[in-house]
Image (cartoon, rainbow, N blue to C red):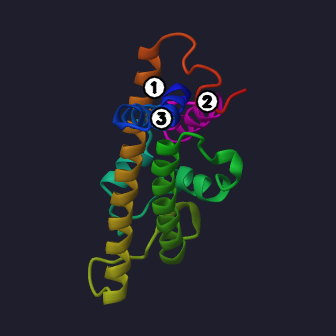
Amino acid sequence: MLLSLTWLCRDPGWEPLIAFIIALGVHIGWDGWNTFHVISTHDQSLIAKFRQLIPHDSRTIPFLRDADWAIPFNYDRIEPLFRIHDEWKSADYEFDNKSLKNTWNKFRESNDALITLATQATFPHDGNPNLVTMDFSDFNNPPEKIAERNALNDRSSHVYMCYEDLVRLIRRLQWRAEQAGPGYPPQGVGSPDP
């Protein structure tokens, strides 16, 4: 890039300008590629914690996918979502990779909205803290109770979609890292690791 800039200064024609623009585009593109496709050690650690908290075969995932908040359920199905809402707030829980950060923020915002709705609309069933209910009956539910149930079901489906997007992205980034071989990502080239 420096050579094309020198060439442009000595001979202000089309060729040096085109060479400079191409070199600049490659430089910017390479930097952009690394910021979107490199998984730092910190990100790998967060991914492992996230997968341990909500593994794909956990009871949380089918609950989100097939949610019906009108039926009483065990608190352990949504407990990981509450833990993310309550504990994953600090900078320690922010991803370095830009695409991971964006997808994670969508998941977290959707989850936070779900937890806010859930804390307003649900409570322990018959005093049992492990069983959660909306106190929804089969008959004579006021319209606002039906609207709450529908909002919770819709938000659960959205959290599930955001979760799936995050898992797909993680899988894709890990696959790319595996394809790159040992020593990936190259240290000092777009990697936040020292």
In the picture as drawn, the residue positioned furthest to the top comes out as: 182
In the displayed structure image, the side of residue 45 where residue 107 appears, left or right: left
- Is residue 34 at least partly visible in the picture? no
Q: Position of residue 185 (x, y in %)?
A: 56, 21
Task: Choose between 73 and 69: the one closer to the eye.
Answer: 69
Crowd band around label 2 with a 10 angstrom C-alpha radius: few (<14), some (14–19), many (20+): many
* Quadrant in which residue 72 is drawn: bottom left
Task: Choose between 14 and 191: the one closer to the eye.
Answer: 14
| Amino acid type assigned to the residue bearing label 2 in the image | Ser
Q: Identify whether 15 is placed above or below 76.
A: above
Q: Nearer the viewer, mark 2 or mark 3?
A: 3
Q: Is residue 12 magenta?
A: no
Residue labelled with disc 3: 8
Q: Nearer the viewer, mark 1 or mark 2?
A: 2
Residue labelled with disc 1: 174
Q: Which mark is residue 191?
A: 2
Crowd band around label 3 with a 10 angstrom C-alpha radius: few (<14), some (14–19), many (20+): some
Distance from the alpha carbon under mark 2 to that under mark 3:
32 Å
Distance from the alpha carbon under mark 1 to that under mark 3:
41 Å
Q: Earlier in the sequence, mark 1 or mark 3?
A: 3
| Amino acid type assigned to the residue bearing label 1 in the image | Gln
